[in-house]
Structures are given as C-alpha cells and as structure tokens.
Image (spheres, grey):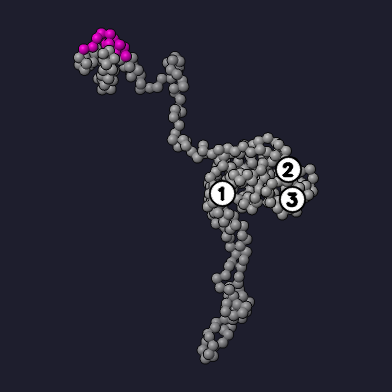
Amino acid sequence: MALSVSRRLLRSFGSVLASGRCDSPSSLYQSLHASLGVVSSEEFSAVSKAGSSFLANRRLSTSIPSPESSGGAFPSNLLSAKPVVASESNIGTRKGLYQDLVIPVTNFHNEDKGFTVLAGDVFDVPIRKDIIHRVVLWQLAKRQQGTHSTKTISEVSGTGRKPWNQKGTGRARQGSLRSPQFRGGSTMHGPKPRSHAFKLNKKVRRLGLKIALTARAAEGKLLIFDDFEVPTHKTKNIANYVQQMEDSKKLLLVDGILPEKLKLATQNLHYVNVLPAVGLNVYSILQHDTLVMSRTAVNEIVERMHTPIKR
C-alpha cells in the first residue's frame, strides 16, 4: 500500500511540477490534495522537501554555475563539452575490421631477426581484380611514349601539279600525286604524337597498391628483411641467395635507399630487380612472383598509404 501511494505521489508531483503551477509548498500541498484526496503529514513533509529543493534548483537553472561560484561543490568534469557517446559515423568503420599481420624478419643468410607487424589496412584488404586491372591499364597507357607520327598530304614531298586533265583521258580524275592512293603518297587519319595517359583517381591507385601487397602477403610471397646489406658486390653471392629460396623465380627487392653494392650485384641478373620504396607500383609487383621488402621500405609504404590525399 505504501509503495503504491509513493508511486502515486511521484506521478502527481511530476505532473504538478511539469505544469509550472507550483511556487510554494502550500500550493504543492493543495495540488496533491486535490489529485490524491488524502495525504499524510509524513508524506507531505517528504514531498515538500523534495519540492523546495527542486524549486531552488529550478530558479538557478537559467545559468550554468561555475566551480568558483559554487565553492567547488559542482563537479568540473560535468562541465566538459565532449560528447558522452561516440558519434555513429565513427562506429563500425572499415578501418576497425582490418587485422594486422605478424611476419618473421630474416635476411639473405636466412637468420632470425625477430618479427614485424604489418598494418592491416595496407596488407590485409579485400582482393579486387577489377581495381588491379584498372591500375595496370593506367600504368601501361601512361608509360607509352606517344611519338608515332605519319605525314599528311601537306607534309609529303612531291609536286602539286594536277597529274592529267579532268576529262577526256578515260582515266579516273586525280588532283595530286601526293594523295594516299599513289605510291609515296600521304597517310590519311594516321597517328600523330599525343599522350595516351588518362586520369585515374588517386584513391583507386592507392587501393590498387594495397591490393597487390595484400595478394603477395596472402600467397606467402612477401618476405621482410632486416636490411639489404651484402658483404660484396659479386653477382654470384646474390645468385646463391636466390637459389636457396623456395619457389622464387623472379624477385623484386624494395628498400628505402638502395645500397650501392646491391645495385652492382643485381644488375646482371634478369630475374632480380631492385626498386626504391618511393617507386613501388602495382605492375612491378605483378611482374615478380616474390616481393622482398626491408623494414624501412615497409614503414615508408605504410606512412605513404596513411597520408591524406591532397585534392
């Protein structure tokens, strides 16, 4: 019974305060008496205390008190403007779904150099062949020289005289011996020097490189070396290192700054190529079945992939 009366009191008290007709405990008592019929003195005293405290706070609700004005009683952390709940736009993003990869680190002598962690949003993205195809076409089109050229009728060396009369000879009418139907004549609608490059969005190009790196890592064809330091510039040493690797026919060595000895040791090997980290691209990765990167190259590639795209 007491519980039901308390609930009725709270409901009535809330309705009275929400209506804004309460200015004093006496008026609060009249309103509760009218709504409930009978209210005991103990219940009224409890409700009047709650009402007076609520009204006091209600009068002060027009301004936010500062910790200095309230004597330090108001918690300062409640004045923070930061949202308590994170925004929905940051929940469930794709970046949180990627999984980082842990790969052992070795060198040319197959020595254990510990482990390294590869960023999941660079080396573990979904494989999309259509993106790879678009990036490769863009690279091949951009690398074309575009210096092919043919001569038009105004550029061909020859006479400008009309070969024969227009009528009376029984032959077909002709206007110039430099026309394309004559030997040594011009070429109509032939190629001219131009650029074959076309535009491809930077996001697509960056995604293509991520997919190529992910494919090599998923195949187990991505090797991480501590460094590319070799004792000598002899080619036979690199050839012996490559022969010791399993299922490696063509290697691409990527480093931040390539050592000079490594360049000299690999320049006569058609199945071993070297590239700086800044020049790593999709087509070069696809041309080699094994990708070997140094720690420095991995850090530079990850930093490049995480750099915002300038528009």
Q: Amino acid at mark 2?
A: Phe
Q: Which of pointers 1 and 2 lies earlier in the amino acid sequence?
A: 2
Q: Residue at x 51, y 89 (%)?
A: 167
Query: Which element is circle 2 on?
Result: loop
Query: Which element is circle 3 on?
Result: helix
**Left-right relation of 238 to 163:** right
Task: Estimate the x, y position of residue 263 in percent, counting from the top left.
Answer: 74, 49
Q: Residue at x 66, y 36 (%)?
A: 115
Task: Estimate the x, y position of residue 139 in percent, counting from the top left.
Answer: 59, 55
- Residue picked out by circle 1: 208
Magenta stretch? Answer: 38-50
Q: Amino acid at mark 1?
A: Gly
Q: Amino acid at mark 3?
A: Thr
Q: Specify whether residue 146 is painted magenta.
A: no
**Left-right relation of 141 to 47:** right
Q: Quadrant of residue 222?
A: top right
- Residue picked out by circle 3: 266
Crowd class of label 2 (few under 14; some 14 to 19; many from 20; radius 10 Å): some
Q: Residue at x 35, y 22 (%)?
A: 62
Of 295 and 245, nearer the camera is 245
Q: Quadrant of residue 55?
A: top left
- Residue picked out by circle 2: 108
Marks 1 and 2 sit apart, C-alpha to C-alpha, by 29 Å
From this view, report whether residue 265 is shown above or below residue 6.
below
Of 99 and 19, nearer the camera is 99
Q: Which of pointers 3 and 2 lies earlier in the amino acid sequence?
A: 2
Task: Estimate the x, y position of residue 269 in percent, counting from the top left.
Answer: 74, 53
